[in-house]
């Protein structure tokens, strides 16, 4: 089952459903039944999406849910998971897809086949490509104190020394185990959700898929990048925030709140304090380097250091870590 969380992205969702319909027809000959649920996160688009589903003849396999509030990416996906577990026959796999994606031929079937061949795999993600078809072959390492140091300094020789800690990881043409994948095109095995529950709804947006992949790996499953499955992704269209290095406006507050939660929740407050201190110090050095060179440079994020400090656990008021809010199937709740 494809799970699509939408907020004011009705037109994008319509295109995605059309691409899923093609994939559904192609995979039906192999015995694979593809269904989809679209969760409208209280954006007012549900009626338009429902009309498109009916007029396109997709109402037999696409369900539109109206969330009572905009609870964020994790919240919306958990509603989709819940819908799947309420069906008479629970899907074997849940394919999280951003509304600004379109699946290429074989994208769904390729991941299902990969799972069949790798019983220890809990999560598998597609390779992404831009709208013009150019590849975007990246998966990621977990953020760490050293990755924060690298980002702040932005020095070539430092990046080479810390290459095994840099978050973005350029991938090849064969399937590989990774730390985490973009939630834009991530398939999860049903048994993972049965055992561990869904995503942490305390994250509104960003870092939730990193947190989820870490939870899944800690439970003994593997996480894979599968380039044979290809998905087109129009970066930033569903969130309004483009790639981290390409933004020309301040990042939203929830990005910094999610970052703070990830480090504090998974590594403890002392580690979170250290990452904030290292990021702020290295960012100051990196900015000094940019001013000194005065050459061509990647545009920075406006007010980045100020926003990091404002949301940092260096402030005592920011040191409380709320317990995770994770939907679980009824069979796992007591």
Image (cartoon, helix red, strand yellow):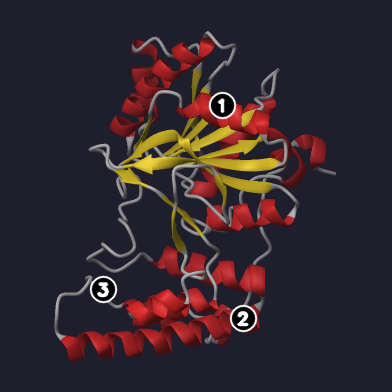
- Secondary element under disc 3, as helix, strand or loop, is loop
Can residue 27 be spotted in the picture? Answer: yes
229 sits left or right of 136 in the view: right
161 sits left or right of 215 in the view: left
Of all residues, the one furthest to the right in this rendering is: 334
Q: CA distance from mark 2 to mark 1?
A: 38 Å
- Secondary element under disc 2, as helix, strand or loop, is helix
Task: Give x and y (percent) for residue 43.
Answer: 38, 40
Taking the spot 65% from the left edge, 68% from the top edge, the residue there is 266
* Label annotation for residue 291: none
Task: Give x and y (percent) for residue 168.
Answer: 43, 61
Q: CA distance from mark 3 to mark 1?
A: 39 Å
Taking the spot 55% from the left edge, 57% from the top edge, the residue there is 210
Disc 3 vs disc 1: Cβ atoms closer than 8 Å? no
- Of the residues under marks 2 and 1, which one precedes in the sequence? 1
Task: Give x and y (percent) for residue 19.
Answer: 37, 23
Q: Nearer the viewer, residue 94 or 180?
A: 180
Task: Give x and y (percent) for residue 104.
Answer: 38, 28
243 sits left or right of 322 in the view: left
Q: Give the labeled residue for mark 1.
A: 1
Crowd rating for badge 3 (residues with CA inside 10 Å; few <14, some 14–19, many 20+): some
Q: Give the labeled residue for mark 2.
A: 271
Q: Nearer the viewer, residue 97 or 240?
A: 97
- Residue 138 vertical placement versus 36 (above, below): below
Q: Give the labeled residue for mark 3.
A: 300
């Amino acid at each position: 089952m494809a799970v699509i969380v939408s907020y004011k992205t009705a037109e994008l969702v319509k295109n995605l459903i059309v691409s899923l319909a093609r994939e559904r027809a192609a995979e039906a000959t192999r015995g694979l039944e593809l269904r989809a649920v679209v969760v409208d996160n209280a954006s007012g688009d549900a009626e338009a999406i429902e009309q498109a589903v009916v007029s396109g003849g997709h109402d037999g396999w696409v369900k539109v849910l109206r969330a009572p509030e905009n609870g964020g990416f994790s919240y919306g996906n958990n509603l989709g998971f819940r819908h799947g577990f309420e069906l008479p026959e629970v899907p074997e796999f849940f394919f999280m897809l951003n509304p600004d994606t379109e699946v290429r031929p074989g994208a769904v079937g390729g991941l299902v086949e990969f799972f069949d061949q790798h019983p220890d795999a809990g999560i598998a993600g597609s390779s992404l490509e831009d709208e013009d078809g150019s590849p975007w072959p990246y998966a990621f390492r977990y953020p760490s104190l050293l990755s924060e140091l690298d980002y702040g300094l932005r020095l070539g020789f430092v990046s080479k020394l810390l290459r095994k800690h840099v978050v973005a990881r350029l991938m090849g043409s064969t399937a590989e185990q990774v730390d985490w994948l973009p939630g834009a095109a991530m398939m999860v095995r049903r048994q993972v959700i049965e055992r561990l529950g869904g995503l942490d709804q305390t994250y509104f947006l960003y870092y939730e898929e990193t947190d989820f992949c870490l939870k899944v790996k800690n439970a003994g499953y593997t996480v894979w990048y599968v380039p044979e499955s290809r998905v087109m992704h129009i970066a930033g269209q569903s969130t309004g925030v483009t790639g981290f290095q390409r933004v020309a406006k301040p990042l939203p507050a929830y990005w910094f709140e999610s970052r703070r939660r990830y480090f504090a929740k998974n590594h403890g407050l002392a580690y979170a304090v250290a990452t904030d201190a290292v990021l702020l110090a290295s960012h100051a050095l990196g900015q000094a380097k940019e001013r000194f060179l005065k050459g061509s440079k990647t545009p920075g994020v406006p007010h980045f250091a100020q926003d990091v400090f404002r949301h940092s656990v260096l402030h005592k008021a920011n040191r409380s870590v709320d317990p995770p809010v994770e939907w679980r199937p009824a069979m796992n709740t007591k």
